């Protein structure tokens, strides 16, 4: 089991884009401390995807067959496609250009966003007291069965990133809204141990963000792809958006950089990935609670 001990809930292939020589700068909100770590040592937990109950899945099936063999390859593809799309779009010094990503590729990117959003310890904790009933045909008896699932790894998986109905609904929502890429030539964007930032559009006067499903309420979502690139997805019914504000690559200004980075810090469970930034550049006196 030793070689499978570290299970990353943020992929190393993603974190490497924010690292130098295999190491990365982090800030721990809980310890209020800066660190310089090897990529393999952060955003991971011992046997995070190990299934301990007897199951139709093998112990390491989620880690090896799903994440290592399927998700990681698509993650690399997603980053490469977005980087190339930015390069192809930006000609000269124009502040914005048209973004071109094929529909099938956009669906893959939306799926990667969905998986990353739900795979972290925050949702493991959120579903820690839940019990899921699995219904299906037994491969042994070929009879219809109902099985209560209590293993925390399987409950987390089946409730979120392996929930087909939730996947369909969320990916459809993301695809049907407005995609913008913010770009900077400098290493300005932070990320974290919860890299997908989902901000519900408030319908009431509240400063509380709750862990409801992305596809069930209007939201603004963004995902730092590299220190140079952030993918933003706006709800199509957001007020005051121009009809042309869609499928664009936009050069990021300092105000937008600050807005994105401060919300990345707020959304982090603990670790903020800094690259070359100092956490003291950002005021953390913000009355915003993530539940």
Image (cartoon, rainbow, N blue to C red):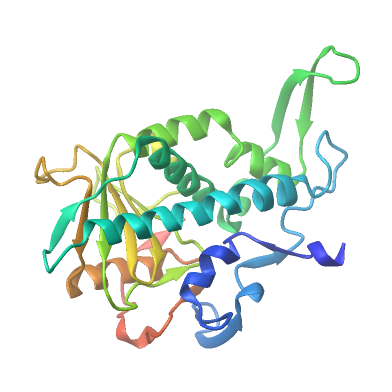
Residue at x 61%, y 59% (from the top left corner)? 9
262 w.r.t. 240: above or below: below
Q: Position of residue 231 (x, y in %)?
A: 33, 56
| Quarter of the image with the N terminus in it | bottom right
Q: Nearer the viewer, residue 75 or 111?
A: 75
146 w.r.t. 87: above or below: above
32 w.r.t. 254: above or below: below
Residue pushed farthest right?
140
In the image: residue 63, left or right of residue 160: right
Q: Quadrant of residue 37?
A: bottom right
Q: Position of residue 80 (x, y in %)?
A: 44, 57
230 w.r.t. 70: above or below: below
Residue 208 can be seen in this image: yes
In the image: residue 63, left or right of residue 37: right
Q: How many marks?
A: 0
Q: Position of residue 125 (x, y in %)?
A: 62, 53
Residue at x 58%, y 52% (from the top left corner)? 73
Residue 287 can be seen in this image: no
Residue at x 59%, y 34% (from the top left corner)? 163
Residue at x 65%, y 73% (from the top left corner)? 40
Q: Nearer the viewer, residue 230 or 196?
A: 230
Q: Nearer the viewer, residue 289 or 16?
A: 16
């Amino acid at each position: 089991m030793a070689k499978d001990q570290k299970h990353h809930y943020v992929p190393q292939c993603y974190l490497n884009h924010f690292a130098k020589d295999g190491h990365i700068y982090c800030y721990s909100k809980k310890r209020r401390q800066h660190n310089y770590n090897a990529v393999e040592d952060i955003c991971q937990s011992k046997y995070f995807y190990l299934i301990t109950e007897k199951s139709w899945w093998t112990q390491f099936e989620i880690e090896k067959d799903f994440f290592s063999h399927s998700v990681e390859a698509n993650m690399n593809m997603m980053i490469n496609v977005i980087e190339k799309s930015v390069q192809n779009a930006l000609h000269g010094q124009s502040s914005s250009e048209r973004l071109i990503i094929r529909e099938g590729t956009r669906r893959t990117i939306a799926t990667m966003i969905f998986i990353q959003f739900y795979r972290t310890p925050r949702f493991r904790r959120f579903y820690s007291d839940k019990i899921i009933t699995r219904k299906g045909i037994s491969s042994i008896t070929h009879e219809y069965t109902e099985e209560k699932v209590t293993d925390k790894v399987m409950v987390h998986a089946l409730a979120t990133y392996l929930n087909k109905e939730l996947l369909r609904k969320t990916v459809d929502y993301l695809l049907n809204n407005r995609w913008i890429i913010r770009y900077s030539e400098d290493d300005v964007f932070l990320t974290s141990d919860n890299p997908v930032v989902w901000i519900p559009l408030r319908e009431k006067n509240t400063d509380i963000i709750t862990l409801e499903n992305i596809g069930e309420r209007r939201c603004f979502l963004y995902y730092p792809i590299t220190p140079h690139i952030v993918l933003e997805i706006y709800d199509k019914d957001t007020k005051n958006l121009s009809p042309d504000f869609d499928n664009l690559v936009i050069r990021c200004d300092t105000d937008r950089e600050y807005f994105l980075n401060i919300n990345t810090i707020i959304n982090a469970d603990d670790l903020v990935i800094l690259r070359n930034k100092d956490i003291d550049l950002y005021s953390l006196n913000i009355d915003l609670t993530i539940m």
